[in-house]
Structure formats: C-alpha cells, structure tokens
Image (tube, grey):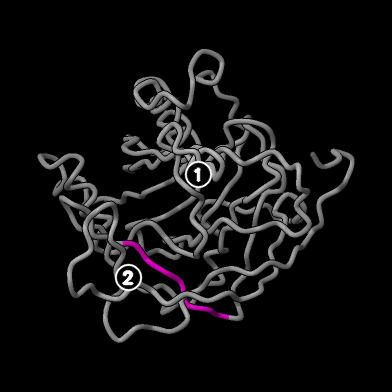
Amino acid sequence: MSNASDSPLAVVEAPLAYLLEAPAAKPVFYVNTPIPENPRKGPQLGPRTMSIHDARQLEEKPRLEVEGVELVPAASDFRKAHDFYDPDAVRAHYYPEIEALVARETGAKRVIAFDHNLRSRALAKAKLHEAQLPVVFAHNDYTETSGPQRVRDLVPDEAESLIKNRFAVINVWRPTRAPVEESPLAVLDAQSMGPDDLVSMDLIYVDRIGEIQSLKYNPKHRWLYYARMTPDEAMLLKCFDSSRDGRARFTAHTAFTLPNTPEDATPRESVEVRTMAFF
C-alpha cells in the first residue's frame, strides 16, 4: 500500500480512451445479448494522454451545476449494518439514503434511485458479487433521447407531466472500502466540452435498446479527479439535465490508470447509484 504521507500530485498525466473519429453510422454495444450475423460497428477508440487535475487541490472547488461534478462528505449508515455485496439490501436500505443525499445537495423536490453497479476489477475477474469492471473509455450515461425515456420507463403514468419541468440524472459514486489507490474516476469539466464532442451510441440489450454518449478528443478538455476518495465521501455526477439555462448538462467520465500505482495498492471497490431528480 502506498505511504499515506506521500502527497498526491496536483496534476497527473495519463492516457484516456477517446472516440477516434465520428463514425459514419451510429456505433453500438451489444450488452449480454447474442451478436447478430451482421453486427453494427462498435466505437473505434484510441488513447490520448491528458492532464488530470486533483480537484482537492484546486482553488475553486468543482460544483455540480458548473463543472458537472461535486464531492460531498457523506458518511453512510448503510455501511454500518449492511453489505454492498447484497443487491437487495442496497435497493432496500442504501437507495433511500442516496435519495435523501441528492435531495439535500440539489434542492430536488423528489428523487428516485433506480439502478446501481458494484465495480471492482478483482471481483469481476473472480466473478463474485455480480461486480463489473471499471469502464475505461470516456463516456456519458444519458443523451437527449434516453434521459426523458428513462423517466417514461420509471414512472410511465406520471412521465409526461414530470418532464414538463426540470429533471436531471445524477449518479452518486462512492468507494466501498479503503481509500481509492487504483483505477480512480476521472471526470470531464463540463465547461471545457464543445457542443459536438459527444457522440450518441446504442446499447443493445436482450429486451431493450439504451443510448449513451462517447467522447471525441478536444485539446480544450479539462479533466478532474479526487485523489484517495474514502468511503465517507460521495461524488455527485451530472449525466443529464433537461435545463438549457447554461448549467452543466452532461459530464463525461472514465476510470483511468493512476501513474506509479504501487503493485500492492488496494484494489478499488466502488458503488454507483443512478438517481432521477425532479425540481
């Protein structure tokens, strides 16, 4: 394990996986479903070495409505009595905790937690606890189409009235064990993103088609991360906002390899909960 007295660098350089070029046809991912005989092409990705700033050391701390990301103190009562490896317990007891957190931090009148992922490279390779690998390409989870559609999926009887007012998809990301030393999450400052940088792609499931966004390279991109996040902190990430008043609407993100990660670094384990916030 790395020495706790070692101060994280204010800026690190690391390769991030970008969409190499805008494809002629909409790219696609096939998710746990048979690939057809003539599949559509997936995104063509390639590395770009980028500067990634430790947001803890910035003079101006990132804000959810400006940069699209914010770190908040959030000690979890769930961790004292339950296990993140138990998905039923997470839904029954952790979701309400996260709904209250998002409502408190954003002022939302109503928050619905609707999905979560446990991520760990070690657990995923061992096929334990339904854990998934960290996602290692720059992407955003929702689009102009899939944001409103998710509301229709969640609350079909109320959807049309709800989407007349502002709503947002906000992810809440938290380490579930020791401070993160391996595969931290980098987040793109929403202010640095150009209007054409995000490219929609389909996610083909057995029973539905989703839509996310991949990211084209732009030298103006400003990347952020929070060094050594602990389980008593939570990162709020804006993945969609229906408002067009100038606030952050989309926030690309990706796991990355932190330079000089020690060989005995504690493997990252994290949980992310997706919420829908209504204002």
Look at 40% across and 20% down and name the residue there: 93
Mark 1 sits on what residue?
Answer: 125
| Front one among 72 and 17 | 17
Give the distance between the C-alpha atoms of the residues marked 2 and 1, in whole angstroms: 29 Å
**Residue type of the residue flagged with mark 1:** Lys
Q: Which residues are magenta?
A: 212-218
Residue indicated by mark 2: 200
Q: Residue at x 27, y 65 (%)?
A: 202
| For marks 2 and 1 on the same chain, the one whose residue lies earlier in the sequence | 1
Residue found at the far left of this picture: 157
Position of the N terminus by quadrant: top right
* Residue 5 position in % (x across, y down): 89, 40
Give amino acid for label 2: Ser
What residue is drawn where x is 16% and y is 45%? 159
Residue 263 position within the rendered picture, expressed as x and y whole percent measured from the top left: 76, 47
Residue 157 position within the rendered picture, expressed as x and y whole percent measured from the top left: 10, 39
Say whether marks 2 and 1 touch (CB < 8 Å). no
Q: Is residue 110 above or below residue 215?
A: above
Packing grade of label 1 (10 A; few <14, some 14-19, many >=20) is few
